[in-house]
Amino acid sequence: MPEWKTTIIKKVKINKPVLIVGMPGIGNVGKIAADIMVDQLKAEPIIKLFSDCLPNSVFVQEDNMVELPRIEFKHKKKGKQDFLFLVGDVQPMREEDSYSFAHAVIDVAVKYKCKEIVTLGGIGLQAPPEKPRLFCTGNDKKFIDEFVKLGVNNKLHGIVGPIMGISGLLLGLSKEEKIRAACLLSETFAHPMHLGLREAKEIMKLLEQKYKLGLDMSKVEKDITKLEKDIKPIAKQQELLEEEKLSSASHQDTSYIG
């Protein structure tokens, strides 16, 4: 398996944290939710992970300089409860790499005696949902029931197929370490250009109910409204390009016999 380099950025005392995982995926629902929470709560980076199995690319930053793909654990203490957030630019897609990544994350969870893990993701639909529903599954029925009491649907069988990547693997691997884990999934639009901003907000509202993180949901709404305004011209341009491609394909010569 590929090796993962774990680097301590800052040493902090952490006791039985809740680990919330929001990595890129369908609609980037989990990533958007985790990134906004980390930003609002001013969670501090404490560990970074890196492996040569990550995409062979760099990201251009706002200052026009480049950085390698970043995956980090960020920490925030609320009252007596510690929270860890796993956030990043990318996640491995090959099966072997995905497993090695999940094992590296579990190693950190075990080291800090993590008491529970919540992974975030999306369920891809063929059209944007007007009011996205939230679903929950996991490795511990009592833990799932805690979310069901908050209004989440646990009837996932037949609605979603395998849960791919880190959001799914952590549920299975953490069970072996006796860490209870749940996955929160929001309905979203399964289009590569779609950003699940409203879907991410629904997940954040639920996590605020459950953990009393101290999120300012009115500020979340303002941030999302601004992001929607910023990406609308880009989305429209992409939509026109897609229409142009379809139109071009439909006018190709098909008079041959083959």
Image (spheres, helix red, strand yellow):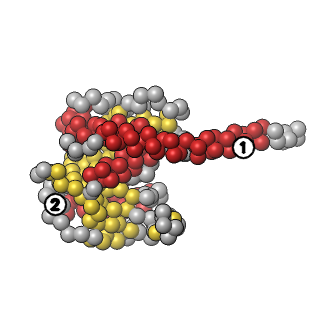
Number of on-image labels: 2
| In the rendered image, the vertical position of residue 247 relative to residue 83, given as above or below | above
Q: Quadrant of the N terminus?
A: bottom left
Residue 245's disc number: 1
Name the residue rendered at 63%, 45% in the picture: 238
Q: Residues within 10 Å of mark 1 (few under 14, many from 20)?
A: few
Name the residue rendered at 25%, 40% in the picture: 208
Task: Report x, y in % for residue 223.
Answer: 40, 44
Left or right: residue 78 compared with residue 23: left
Closest to the observer: 157 or 188?
A: 188
Q: Residues within 10 Å of mark 2 (few under 14, many from 20)?
A: some
Q: Secondary structure at mark 1?
A: helix
Q: Secondary structure at mark 2?
A: loop
Q: Disc 2 or 1, which lies upstream in sequence?
A: 2
Splitting the image into 4 quarters, where does residue 204 fall? Answer: top left
Task: Report x, y in % for residue 40.
Answer: 30, 50
Left or right: residue 114 compared with residue 157: left
Task: Report x, y in % for residue 92.
Answer: 44, 59
Task: Report x, y in % for residue 118.
Answer: 28, 46
Regarding residue 112, the answer to whether it shows in the image is yes
Name the residue rendered at 37%, 62% in the picture: 71
Residue 14's disc number: 2
The amino acid type found where label 1 is placed reads Lys
Residue 69's disc number: none
